[in-house]
Structures are given as C-alpha cells and as structure tokens.
C-alpha cells in the first residue's frame, strides 16, 4: 500500500466513525423519546424488551467501533512501515496516533457510551422520573 492509499483509508475511517457516532446519538435520542412517550408507564415486559433491544444494538455498535479501531490501528502500523518516505500529511497522521490522541478519543467514546447506556437502563427500570402533569386523567382533563 502506498501512503496515498493509507491516508485515503484513514480519511474514510473517520467518515465511518462519524456515521457510527451519529447512529449512536440517534439511538439514544429515540430511546429517550420512547421513555418519555410511553415506556415510563409501560409494564415490565415491554420495558425488558426495549432494554434488551437497546442492549443488543449497543453491543453491535461496540463491536463495530472495536473493529473500526483495529482497522485504524492497522493503517497506522502500515504508515509506520513506510515512515522514512512519508510526506507531511503522513507524518502528522502517524504523530497523531503515537501521541495518544486516538487512544483518548477511543476511551472518551467508550466512557460516554457506557455512561449513556447505564443512564438509559436506570431511567427505564428504576426511576419514576416522568412528570405526570401532561397525562390525561380518567375524566379527560390534563393534569
């Protein structure tokens, strides 16, 4: 592989990574809407099903991010092999990986993902957090 091929793949990796992050944000947003709209008052079976589905999707996204991370590290290793011949762009990509910035991003994304997941599980099962003022009573009135 040439440096140009490797840099092109690293840029494509960033596109894939941003796409994965956007899917995660969409998933969390949709789940929060579902919590607000109906899951807070749903029975345990529906909450368990929703939480199981959320868990499966989060595991899938975690595997996706792990695979993408391994691919990115392989590309960085390929750059290291041709290090003496690198252009400034290649040297900066290699320096980015060697200074630990990529690891910090990886750790931050993992930590944020785990925190959001556990927050959603807590909101699903153990918190009566929803205000009841918007729910219609038996008489048809709000509140």
Image (cartoon, rainbow, N blue to C red):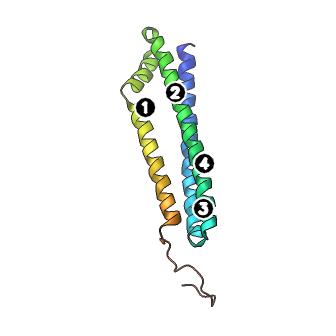
Of circles 4 and 1, which is in front?
Answer: 4
The reply, left or right, for residue 19 in relation to residue 101 is right
Residue marked by disc 2: 72
Task: Give the mark, 4 or 1, whose residue is nearer the N terminus.
Answer: 4
Task: Give the mark, 4 or 3, whose residue is nearer the N terminus.
Answer: 3
Residue marked by disc 3: 48
Q: Residues within 10 Å of mark 2 (few under 14, many from 20)?
A: many
Residue under the image location 42 percent in, 26 percent down: 97
Quadrant occupied by the N terminus: top right
Q: Position of residue 26 (x, y in %)?
A: 58, 52
Label 2 and label 1: CA atoms lie apart by 9 Å
Mark 2 in CB contact with mark 1 (< 8 angstroms) = yes
- Tell me: residue 123, above or below residue 7: below
Residue marked by disc 1: 102
Residue under the image location 46 percent in, 42 percent down: 109
**Depth check: 47 or 82 in front?**
47
Q: Quadrant of residue 62?
A: top right
Mark 4 in CB contact with mark 3 (< 8 angstroms) = no
Task: Give the mark, 4 or 2, whose residue is nearer the N terminus.
Answer: 4
Of circles 3 and 1, which is in front?
Answer: 3
Label 3 and label 1: CA atoms lie apart by 36 Å
């Amino acid at each position: 592989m040439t440096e140009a091929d490797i840099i092109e793949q690293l840029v494509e990796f960033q596109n894939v990574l941003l796409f994965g992050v956007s899917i995660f944000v969409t998933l969390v947003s949709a789940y929060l809407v579902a919590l607000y709209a109906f899951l807070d008052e749903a029975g345990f079976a529906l909450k368990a099903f929703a939480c199981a589905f959320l868990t499966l999707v989060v595991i899938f996204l975690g595997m996706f991010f792990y695979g993408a991370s391994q691919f990115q590290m392989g590309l960085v290793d390929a750059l290291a092999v041709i290090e003496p011949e690198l252009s400034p762009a290649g040297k900066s990509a290699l320096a980015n990986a060697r200074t630990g910035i990529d690891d910090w991003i990886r750790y931050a994304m993992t930590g944020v993902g785990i925190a959001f997941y556990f927050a959603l599980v807590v909101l699903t099962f153990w918190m009566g957090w929803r205000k009841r003022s918007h729910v219609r009573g038996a008489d048809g009135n709000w509140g």
